[in-house]
Amino acid sequence: MFKMSTLLIVLLAVFSGAIAGIGQGSNNEVVQKALDYVSKFSMDTLATLARSIPIPDQSGQAGKVSWRITNIVVRDFTKPSSKVELINNGRGLRWTATNAGVKLHCDWWARYKNWLLRTTKSGSLDASASGVSFSVTVNLGRDSNGQAFVRPAGCTSSVGNIDFDLHGGGWLVSLANWLLNFERKAEEKVKGLLPAKLCTALNSAITSLNTKAKKELNSILDVEDV
């Protein structure tokens, strides 16, 4: 049977790859210590992962202004408040985080074209996203062949606000903002992109853990069943 004590060890094995130093006390206290540990370890991992999330180039058009945003990189990640809790009678966990911050840097290119004038400008851009939150659900258990698994079961994410600071462009950017609200449209484009990219990265990380942890999990569960 997949008992609470087994879940404790599984959580540590999956997220840290090591089982040690749990401490004394009741099962509930020990499990909470493990959950707190998992929360901290996961957040430290996410802070590292966030800086390597690939973000594809973006492009669009606002009236007579065509634009591209390229070479998007994460420069900084502010850790959010984080909590891990058991769900589904100990057969899964939910990791929630609120109020993360992300700073991005990229290059931009824009072209204005009408019957009288055609001009192209470029520069760099710094973006700050705040109020980034997410909730990730993970299932733990055994499949029909008795093999242990760790599977992503769902992810939701949102961005509270995003602000752009454009460098370069001069009068073209000023004109585009005045006539077409160009900067706001670009902000909305990036804001809509970030949640999906974050969930993709989180789910990929969990899936990779499944293969890495399977041997440990099966060994732990076999001991528990004895």
Image (tube, rainbow, N blue to C red):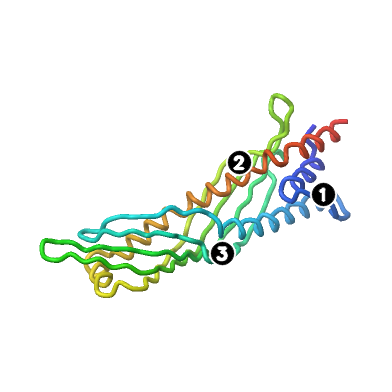
Q: Quadrant of residue 139?
A: top right
Front residue of this view, candidates 18 and 108: 108
Relative horizontal placement of residue 24, taking residue 181 as reference (left or right): right
Residue bearing mark 3: 77
- Residue type at mark 3? Phe
Residue bearing mark 2: 152
Q: Residue at x 32, y 67 (%)?
A: 122
- Residue type at mark 1? Ile
Cα distance between the residues tagged 2 and 1: 22 Å
Look at the numbered disc 2 and give the secondary structure of its residue. strand
Relative horizontal placement of residue 125, taking residue 14 as reference (left or right): left
Disc 3 or 1, which lies upstream in sequence? 1
Residue bearing mark 1: 19
Residue 191 at what x, y percent from top left?
42, 57
Relative horizontal placement of residue 120, taking residue 220 as reference (left or right): left
Residue 87 at what x, y percent from top left?
67, 42
The quadrant in which the N terminus is found is top right
Q: Residue at x 72, y 41 (%)?
A: 213
